[in-house]
Image (cartoon, rainbow, N blue to C red):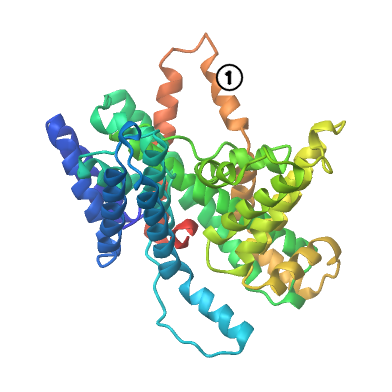
Amino acid sequence: MVFSSPIFLFVFLPFVFLLNKLLPQRFRNTFLLLVSLIFYAWGEPIYIVLMLLSVSVNYGMALLMGPKEDRTSRARLWLVLSIVFNIGMLFVFKYANFFTDNVNWLLGTAIEIPVIRLPIGISFFTFQAMSYSIDVYRGGTKPQKNPGNVLLYISFFPQLIAGPIVLYSDIEKQIQKRDESIEKSASGLKRFAVGLGKKVLIANTLGAVADKVFALAGFEVNAPIAWLGAITYSLQIYFDFSGYSDMAIGLGRMFGFNLKENFDYPYISGSIKEFWRRWHISLSRWFKEYLYIPLGGNRKGTVRTAINLMIVFFCTGIWHGAQWTFVVWGFYHGLFIMLERIGVIRPDKWKFKALGNIYTLLVAVTAFVIFRAETFGQGFSMIGKMFVGWSMTPEMVTFLSATVTPSVVLFLVIGIIGATDLPKKWVRRLAQIRVMPSLLPEIVSMASSLVILGLCVLSLSSTAYNPFIYFRF
């Protein structure tokens, strides 16, 4: 079951929301826990056992560690065992086939293992479970005695499948007590509608164009087609993933939870460092807290800092999937982060701020070409065509005229504007107009949300199912 499916929108969500409101406060956590397990089991009934095992192991290891003030000498052992378990689970279910294929290629062997299907959301719920164990060891979080609270934290359906990655300390108090006002629910519904619109109306439309471009053979691509594919995919992945995050945050609000933001207009960044402060914020935070800083961060000299950064971005790339194009994408970003860190590239010192924006967009967009490509050859060929592909055959003209329809142009313009903070600024200015009735901005906001919901329903009824990109990570 996914947020953009009719059964979720018209059956699951209304039922869960209304029943949650009708239940006494003391029963709501149990209810949300049960519906979260049903939500996950709907599409992955066998893998719910895996998630329950993950929760049980991390919950048990945290209890064995005990509070920091009563720490025993074996606490480090329990921490190591929990980390080994979590990484081992990821390796088996996400990387075993990839590792075996590469060993066979390097050594000329013919080792065979069964093809293992990737459990949905394993990268997200494993990172959450691992952060809980580590935080208990560090003393930032006390071991929770109630297993239901830990299970709800990890399995809470709005962010279970594709984030944001939530730390237990972020919602520990909210699990115990939270505000579930009408105003908060209305705000959550509007945020959910915006996210659904991002996914269904913008990401799906532009994604269809990107799919057509990346399905072409190399000789069928020139500069305009390559740029069309690069830009539409860059917008698709942003609106697809930020749309899911908006929906998760909105659903969280509807049930009284305040989940942290996961995107902050990354395409307006003036450097790659800033880009990663704005893109997939929860993942960047996780790697900073649990990998970069423990490795030494920037405290051990320039060379060590550069090495630490490359390790982090290697892990960022491989986290996204068992494919070398993802690793190269991670290294590509890591290289520019490192160059900015050591002062080789200093966008903050450039005379014109726009140059920093252009530089960041060029790096991010070309990196996403590698990220989307099926092979290195396709990725680097397309990047090359973006800058030197000046041929224009009749077939290319036909492809462009058939692909770049008025609706595509419309959503391309909406996507480019929507990827900036301009709409946010326009809304603020509208709210500051004193001659308007005080409730008008709120009425306009809610009406717009309902219109978006209506358009999404119409779109979903006439198009095939298109899953979120990050479901496969």
* Element at label 1: helix
> Quarter-wise, where is residue 430 in the image?
top right
Where is mark 1, residue-wise? 429
- Residue 435 versus residue 71 in the image, above or below: above
Q: Residue at x 38, y 61 (%)?
A: 120
Q: Residue drawn 81% across and 74% down?
A: 393
Viewer-proximal residue among 188 and 160: 160
Can residue 464 be seen here?
Answer: no
Label 1 packing within 10 angstroms: few (<14), some (14-19), many (20+): few
Number of labels in the image equals 1
In the rendered structure, the answer to whether residue 384 lies left or right of residue 49 reads right
Judge left or right: residue 195 versus residue 145: right
Q: In the displayed orientation, state which residue is furthest to the top.
A: 435
Pick the front one: 42 or 47: 47
Residue nearer the viewer, 307 or 393: 307
Quick check: 154 above or below 2?
A: above
Question: Can you give x and y, in whole percent of width and height, for residue 331 in the image?
Answer: 68, 57
Tell me where residue 390 sits by quadrant: bottom right
Quarter location, residue 250: top left
Which residue type does callout 1 highlight? Arg
Position of 300 relative to 400 (above/below): above
Identify the residue shown where x is 28% and y is 48%: 59
Q: Position of residue 240 (x, y in %)?
A: 51, 51
**Residue 268 visible, this angle:** yes
Instruction: Estimate the x, y position of residue 43 in percent, counting from the top left.
Output: 29, 63
Instruction: Provide residue 374's location: percent of width, then percent of height.
Output: 62, 72
- In the displayed structure, would residue 217 be above or below residue 256? below
